[in-house]
Amino acid sequence: MSVQIWTYLLVGITFAVYIGIAIWSRAGSTKEFYVAGGGVSPLANGMATAADWMSAASFISMAGIIAFDGYDGAVYLMGWTGGYVLLALLLAPYLRKFGKFTVPDFIGDRYYSKTARSVAVFCALLVSFTYVAGQMRGVGIVFSRFLEVEINTGVLIGMIIVLFYAVLGGMKGITYTQVAQYCVLIFAFMVPAIFISIQMTGNPIPQLGFGDTVADGSGTYLLDKLDGLSVALGFDAYTDGSKTMLDVFTITLALMVGTAGLPHVIVRFFTVKRVKDARKSAGYALLLIAILYTTAPAVAVFAKTNLIESVHNKEYQELPSWFKNWEHTGLLGWIDKNGDGKVQYAKGHVVQGNKNKPVFEKEKRGQKGERIISNVNPASENELFVDRDIMVLANPEIANLPNWVIALVAAGGLAAALSTAAGLLLVISSSVSHDLIKKMIKPDISEKGELMAARISAVAAVCVAGYFGINPPGFVAAVVALAFGLAAASFFPAIVLGIFYKRMNKEGAISGMIVGIICMLLYMVKYKLGWFDDVVPSSNEWWFGISPEGFGAIAMSINFIISLVVCQFTAKPPKEVQEIVENIRIPGNAGRPTHE
């Protein structure tokens, strides 16, 4: 069977499973809608958390970043993995014992203020919408290639699917759907990795294969081979890094602390019965996440090596079918600058642009493919444009794997994107219905009315998410990294100080969150979207060499400083609030649900 038929078959089966689970586990109360009734087992919650955590950025984009950035791409591995450990050990058990449904609920009660709750709701919506934009773009990429529809059409299809089970099932439906999605995405990521590892090195374990010798009998190590290919084409050696130590540190820190402030991950720890179960599910999730995260560097090496060997200096007419298939999506392109009919892959940007004003797909037009290249940089010898987000998805095709494996990767990419999108949409809907309407606007709303408000909010959120998926501010992992920066700048200090510092008051927390989120937003829109260039001329240089993905660490530090300074000059929190802070750090009675 063809790739398209296999894709329709596998994607159809997985979608039917997701929808069937949503119907079986539909929510009948607000407690089931928000926290799945609080009765999920640690293993199931660990699998759901892993699926929620491993988004399109982890499945589709992370290995693509590592493939092109080499050593520098390791910051994403370190930041996202370390961040989950930080969340599991530092925050999850205490938040679970506090017993609130959402992060804004925690901040509103801990800081005894409707203003604090309002700021937290705004930050939760901003973080979630930024994050979900990356997921919807990932859905569009998968559909555009494997189901041969436009990216925008793919985004709309993904919106309909995720809307169905998120609105119907709430957290209960999402949880059990994510268990199935974890199985799909990890199987889809590992099967081609094992195939290619055997093919290239003879080693069936990808984590060991990419550090092994190639299977041609030359005795050359795969990484040495890739270093040689990279240097020969004018790139730096793959295993060398070019980022400054400060930028590496800030990106890693921003991703770590941003993880610990992500509302859609934190809420997963409210779905289990006991605090002890929250710790167990965090441990399970970490082990399950590690399977993909330890494999991603190997996939990156396999994909980059195969890409170079299959296209560089080859006649266009002789290129394999996968190249021309991906050209039609607008995510891969070639322009013959020297007129020799060969693809020249070298150092340099084939698309003229800069980091302040990126060139989007809709602006790319070229000689080959439907949407490829505009503003060709004549100074660059490079003739090949490759969108980083295609590397994992195209990898099985480049390696000539069976059609069913290629289709399986498509199903896995959709599972990763949809699982995270569903969790984010739930955060958005609960922030509006529970934190805004129930807690602030209409406290006497009935449970049925609140549940209806949550579902209507989810519908509105899907529409907004779809818009950002069609008009994203960058490739998937870049968008997601910005969401982590926003979470780091806003939530992390307020949560940490709320748990571990009794003296922290509402004035300090509110001031810190507002200043932190504003700093991150200003830096992000200037250096990612190119705003304010007319007012503040751009020098194309980041402050102190810190990229927008890493600035969340600086904004977080500013948040901490502002919060601590302001709280010293304002009144102490009420005595009952200080007692709550002491209580959530004491293990006693940890076996009983604290919200009952």
Image (cartoon, rainbow, N blue to C red):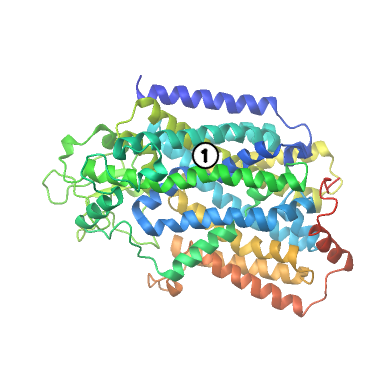
User: Is 593 above or below relative to 15?
Assistant: below
User: Is 536 above or below relative to 18?
Assistant: below
Q: Position of residue 586 (x, y in %)?
A: 81, 58
Q: Secondary structure at mark 1?
A: helix
The quadrant in which the N terminus is found is: top left
Q: Kindly tell me whether residue 73 is visible in this rendering.
A: yes
State which quadrant residue 89 falls in.
bottom right
- The local crowd at label 1, few if under 14, some if 14 to 19, many if 20 or more residues have their Cα within 10 Å, is many
Residue at the top extreme of this rendering: 1
State which quadrant residue 496 falls in.
bottom right
Q: Which residue is mark 1?
A: 416
In this picture, residue 164 sits left or right of residue 94: left
Which residue is depicted at the point 76% across and 40% down?
38
In this picture, residue 69 sits left or right of residue 50: left
259 and 105: which is toward the camera: 259
Q: Kindly tell me whether residue 260 is visible in this rendering.
A: no
In this picture, residue 80 sits left or right of residue 576: left
Q: Position of residue 8 (x, y in %)?
A: 44, 24
Q: Position of residue 491 (x, y in %)?
A: 65, 60
Residue at the right extreme of this rendering: 576
71 and 218: which is toward the camera: 218
The quadrant in which the C terminus is found is: top right
Q: Amino acid at mark 1?
A: Ala
Residue at the left extreme of this rendering: 340
456 and 392: which is toward the camera: 392
- The image shows a total of numbered marks equal to 1
